[in-house]
Amino acid sequence: MHAPIVKRFVLITFNLALTAVCLFGSAGRLDWTNAWVLLGLSFATGVAFTAVLWRNPELVAERSNIKAGKAWDKIIVSVAVLLGPMATWITAGLDARFHWSNAMPAWVLTAGVAVAVLGADLFAWAMQSNNFFSSVVRIQKDRGHTVVAGGPYRFVRHPGYVGMSAFTLATPLILNSWWAFVPAAATAAATLLRTMLEDRTLHNELDGYVEYAGRVKYRLMPGIW
C-alpha cells in the first residue's frame, strides 16, 4: 500500500508542476492570484482523492498499475486529461498576458471555485462508491467487475465524468478568461464522447448493466441525457 500512495503523491507533484509551468510560463509572470487559486484547488483535490483511495487498497492497485483498456480510449484520455487542460491553462495565461478578454465580474472567481469544489466532491464521492473506478475503460473481469448502483450512481450512470466536466468548465472562471472556454469546452466534449463510448461498452460487456440502465436512465444530466 505504501508504494502506490507514494506514487500518487509523485503524480500530484508532477501535475502541479506542469500546471504551474503552463500558467506562469504563458502569463509571463508569477504574481497572478487566479493561477495560485487554481493551483491550491488542484493540490487540495489531489490530496483528497488520495485520501479516498487510501481506504481501498484494491482500487489503489487498479489505478496505479494501469492495464490495457479500449484502443479508442487512449486518444480521448490524452485530450480530456492532458492536452485539453494544458490548452486551457496556456490560453488563460496568454489572455492574462495580452488582455484579450474583458475582465469578468469579481464574483465570477468565487462562483468558479464553488463549481470546481462541487465537481471535485462529486468525483470523490463516485470514486469512494465504486470499487471499479478505473482510469481506463475496461471490464475488470480479473477483479470480479459488477454493476455499481449506490452513492451518486443512483442518480446518473457516470457521476465521475459530471464532476470532471464541472471542474473543467469552472477553470476559465477561476482564471478570469473568456477565451479559455474554447479549449475547456473541447475538453468537456471529449469527456462527453468518452461517456458515450464507455456506456456502450458497459451495455455490451458488463453483466447486469442493461438492467441498471433501465432503472437509472440518464448518463450525465438527469432529465436531459
Image (cartoon, rainbow, N blue to C red):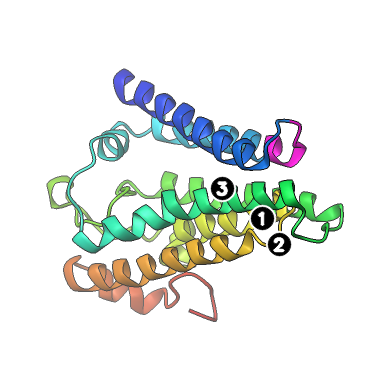
Residue 178 disc label: 2
Residue annotated with mark 3: 120
Q: Is residue 5 above or below residue 29?
A: above
Q: What's the distance in space between the residues labelled 2 and 1, CA to CA?
A: 7 Å
Q: Residue at x 69, y 34 (%)?
A: 36
**Residue type at mark 3?**
Ala
Residue 169, given in percent of the width and then of the height, sits at: 61, 59
Let me know if residue 35 is in the magenta part.
Answer: yes
Query: What is the tally of numbered marks visible in this picture?
Result: 3
Q: CA distance from mark 3 to mark 1?
A: 16 Å
Whether residue 137 appears in magenta in the rendering, the answer is no
Residue 2 in the image, given as x and y percentages of width and height: 33, 18
Secondary element under disc 2, as helix, strand or loop, is: loop
Q: How far from the left and from the top, in percent, is residue 66?
A: 23, 41
Q: In this rendering, which labeled residue sits more in front, label 3 or label 2?
A: 2
Q: Residues within 10 Å of mark 1 (few under 14, many from 20)?
A: many
Element carrying mark 3: helix
Which residue was labeled with disc 1? Answer: 172
